[in-house]
C-alpha cells in the first residue's frame, strides 16, 4: 500500500542543454501521466549554465502541464548518476522511472511498465523496448561486461563472439523476460525498495557504465531485473550525449567514458582484472586489425589505461587521431 502523500510514480527526466528534446519528451508523457492520481514528472536541470531550465519551465506553463510536471535545478553538474539522484531525492514515490531527454514514449508505454510491476511483486527493475523513430528495434538488454568480453569488443570478430557466447554483452530479447543482467537506463523503472536496499546511483560514474554497475549491485543483493517489450520508447540515441556519434565516426571519446570504464572494472574485478581486461582488449584489437575489423576509436589503445583520478583529462579536439 502506498504511504499517505507518497506518489506511486515519479518520472525523472534529466536535462543538460537539451530543452527542446525535454519538451518533446514531456509532450509524449502528457497522455501517460496527466490526470493520473499519484503520477508526476520531475525534470532535473543538471546545471546547464544556459537558459534551459527557464525555457522548460516556460514550456510547462504555456502548455498547462503544471499539475504533473515541474523543474528542479541542480547546483552542480555531477553527471548522469548524480543528476538522476537529485530527481529521485526530490520526489517521494513508490517507483521511479529514469527517462532520457532524447526519448519519446509511445502510447501506453508508461502504463505497460507500471502494470507489469504491479503484477510482479518479485520484479524490482524493468526496462522497456527501445526503438528508432521508424520502429526498428534497439538492443537495450545486456550481459555484464567482463575482462573476456573486452577481447570480443576489441576484435569485433564474430568468430570470437560465437566461441564465447556467454560473454557477448548485447542480448537481443523480444519477449517479456525476468532475470537478466542489466538494462539501458535510457528508460528504466526502479522500485523504491531497490533504492532503500542498495542506495542511490554511484556518483563516481560521471556518465556511462553507471547503469551496468547499479544493476550488478541490485542483482548481487538478490533482486531481479526484467524487460517488457510491450512498452515502446523511441530512443533518439546521442541526443543527450556526443559519445555514440564520436564512436561511429571513430573519434576520440571524452575522458569521462574511460574513467567510468576504469571504475567499473576496478570495482568488480579489482586492479588485476582491470589490467587483464585491457590486455585482452588489446589482443582483440590486434586480431581485428589484422582482419580489417577492429572497432577501435582514435587513441583507444592508450585511453583504456586511464585511471579514474585523471580520466577527465583524456580526450582532445575533434581533429585528434
Image (spheres, rainbow, N blue to C red):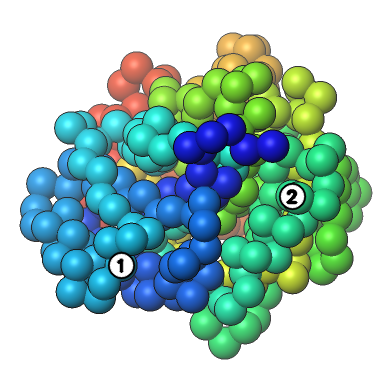
Q: Which of the 4 quarters of the picture holds residue 79?
A: top left
Label for residue 117? 2
Residue under the point 76% across and 22% down: 220
In the image, taking residue 249 as reference, residue 153 lies left or right, namely: right
Q: Position of residue 169 (x, y in %)?
A: 73, 48
Q: Nearer the viewer, residue 211 or 157?
A: 211
- Disc 1: which residue: 65
Q: Nearer the viewer, residue 139 or 93?
A: 93
Q: Position of residue 58 (x, y in %)?
A: 14, 66
Residue 120, placed above or below residue 192: below
Marks 2/1: CA–CA distance:
26 Å
Q: Are marks 2 and 1 in contact (CB under 8 Å)?
A: no
Residue under the point 38% across and 68% down: 26
Secondary structure under tag 2 reads helix
All told, the count of numbered labels is 2
Residue 52, placed above or below residue 7: below
Residue under the point 60% across and 22% down: 196
Residue under the point 55% across and 21% down: 199
Say whether residue 149 is visible. no
In the image, taking residue 292 as reference, residue 262 lies left or right, namely: left
Q: Position of residue 108 (x, y in %)?
A: 63, 74
Q: Which of the 4 quarters of the picture holds residue 214?
A: top right
Amino acid at each position: 500500500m502506498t504511504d499517505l502523500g507518497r506518489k506511486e510514480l515519479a518520472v525523472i527526466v534529466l536535462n543538460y542543454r537539451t530543452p527542446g528534446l525535454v519538451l518533446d519528451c514531456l509532450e509524449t508523457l502528457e497522455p501517460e501521466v496527466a490526470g493520473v492520481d499519484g503520477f508526476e514528472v520531475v525534470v532535473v536541470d543538471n546545471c546547464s549554465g544556459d537558459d534551459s531550465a527557464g525555457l522548460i519551465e516556460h514550456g510547462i506553463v504555456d502548455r498547462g502541464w503544471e499539475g504533473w510536471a515541474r523543474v528542479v535545478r541542480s547546483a552542480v553538474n555531477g553527471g548522469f548518476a548524480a543528476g538522476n539522484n537529485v530527481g529521485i531525492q526530490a520526489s517521494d514515490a513508490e517507483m521511479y522511472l529514469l527517462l532520457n531527454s532524447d526519448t519519446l514514449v509511445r502510447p501506453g508505454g508508461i502504463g505497460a511498465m507500471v502494470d507489469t510491476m504491479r503484477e510482479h511483486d518479485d520484479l524490482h527493475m524493468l526496462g522497456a523496448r527501445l526503438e528508432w523513430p521508424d520502429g526498428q528495434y534497439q538492443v537495450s538488454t545486456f550481459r555484464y561486461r567482463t575482462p573476456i568480453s573486452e577481447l570480443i569488443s576489441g576484435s569485433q570478430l564474430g568468430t570470437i563472439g560465437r566461441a564465447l557466447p556467454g560473454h557477448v554483452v548485447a542480448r537481443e530479447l523480444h519477449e517479456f523476460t525476468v532475470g537478466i543482467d542489466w538494462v539501458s537506463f535510457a528508460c528504466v523503472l526502479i522500485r523504491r525498495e531497490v533504492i532503500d536496499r542498495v542506495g542511490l546511483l554511484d556518483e563516481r560514474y560521471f556518465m556511462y557504465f553507471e547503469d551496468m554497475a547499479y544493476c550488478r549491485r541490485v542483482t548481487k543483493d538478490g533482486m531481479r531485473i526484467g524487460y517488457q517489450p510491450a512498452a515502446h520508447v523511441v530512443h533518439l540515441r546521442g541526443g543527450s550525449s556526443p559519445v555514440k556519434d564520436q564512436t561511429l565516426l571513430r573519434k576520440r571519446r571524452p575522458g569521462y567514458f574511460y574513467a567510468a570504464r576504469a571504475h567499473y572494472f576496478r570495482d568488480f574485478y579489482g586492479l588485476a582484472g582491470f589490467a587483464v581486461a585491457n590486455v585482452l582488449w588489446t589482443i582483440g584489437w590486434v586480431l581485428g586489425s589484422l582482419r580489417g575489423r577492429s572497432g577501435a576509436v582514435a587513441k583507444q589503445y592508450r585511453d583504456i589505461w586511464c585511471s579514474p583520478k585523471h580520466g577527465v583529462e583524456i580526450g582532445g579536439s575533434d581533429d585528434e587521431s
